[in-house]
Amino acid sequence: IKDSYNILYDQVDRIQISSGKVKGVRLSSGKFIQGDVIVTAGAWSGKLLQNAGINVPIEPEKREIFITEDLKFRVKPLVIDLSSGVYFSHTLKGEIIGGIDLEYPRGFSDFSISLSSLLKFRMYVANLVKGAEGIGILRGWSGYYEMTPDHSHIMGYSENWPEGLYIDSGYSGHGMMFSPYSGKIMADLVADNKKSEFIDIFSPSRFESGKAIDEKMVI
Ligand SMILES: Cc1cc2nc3c(=O)[nH]c(=O)nc-3n(C[C@H](O)[C@H](O)[C@H](O)COP(=O)(O)OP(=O)(O)OC[C@H]3O[C@@H](n4cnc5c(N)ncnc54)[C@H](O)[C@@H]3O)c2cc1C
């Protein structure tokens, strides 16, 4: 396998399209890479495609995660408290890791974390876990959820798109869970022309054709 692909570390500035076909990508370094394109740029996918004149509804939404110091006992299940929006699980090392489903504004912003969310997270964890009163927060970080209008990912291609353009993006905060299977589905489609049943369900055209998915379980 190692001779059949190249990995380049660079930024795609533009997807080049001509006469209804994708020609390749222009990189920040100035290089042009020829071939079909699968857009997997997460929260940046909407912007990248918009530059190529294609509208795909994917917007960034900042989310924060916190991690506590070790607990001496285990909290076995993944805990989701729908009333407060707090969710967490226990790492193998012993810390509690999680976040809160707060109202986060859409759009690109900095990757800071806020003290008020940190304190809320700590309070809700202490309320739900006996023995976690006064627990310290070791650190936190933030990133973007890549939100679509129906909170489901966008996968495959549209009949109205230029030939050779694909997408696998917009996982709306649950992309890690999907990644092994979505990678297989996309490889089957692009490399072997084998179309999984999921390609039509998650197609980018579903928003225009009124076939949006009714996904409610998003935290
Ligand atoms: C706080 C937080 C907690 C989460 N928790 C979970 C969880 O518990 N379970 C779960 O399943 N998911 C979780 N997610 C969501 C998960 O991280 C994402 O859904 C997943 O990472 C999406 O994968 P992706 O490859 O589509 O996009 P990304 O992981 O965002 O990767 C996209 C990549 O494209 C790069 N890129 C962007 N623009 C360009 C360009 N022009 N040229 C070149 N490269 C570019 C970016 O730098 C990035 O590296 C969480 C997300 C956040 C922020």
Image: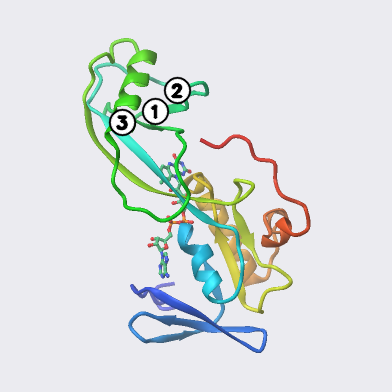
Residue ID at (47%, 79%): 14
Residue 124: image location, x then y, percent = 37, 20
- The residue that disc 2 covers is 77
Residue 131 shows in this picture: yes
Residue 91 shows in this picture: no
Q: Amino acid at mark 2?
A: Pro
Residue ID at (51%, 55%): 59
Residue 152: image location, x then y, percent = 61, 48
Name the secondary structure under disc 2: loop
Q: Is residue 81 left or right of residue 128?
A: right
Q: Amino acid at mark 3?
A: Ser
- The residue that disc 1 covers is 89
Q: Quadrant of the N terminus?
A: bottom left
Residue ID at (32%, 16%): 126
Q: Say whether disc 1 or disc 2 marks the residue closer to the N-terminus.
A: 2
Q: Establish if 165 lies above or below 32.
A: above
Q: Residues within 10 Å of mark 3 (few under 14, many from 20)?
A: few
Q: Is residue 47 left or right of residue 154?
A: left
On residue 116, which mark appears?
3
Residue ID at (64%, 47%): 150
Name the secondary structure under disc 3: helix
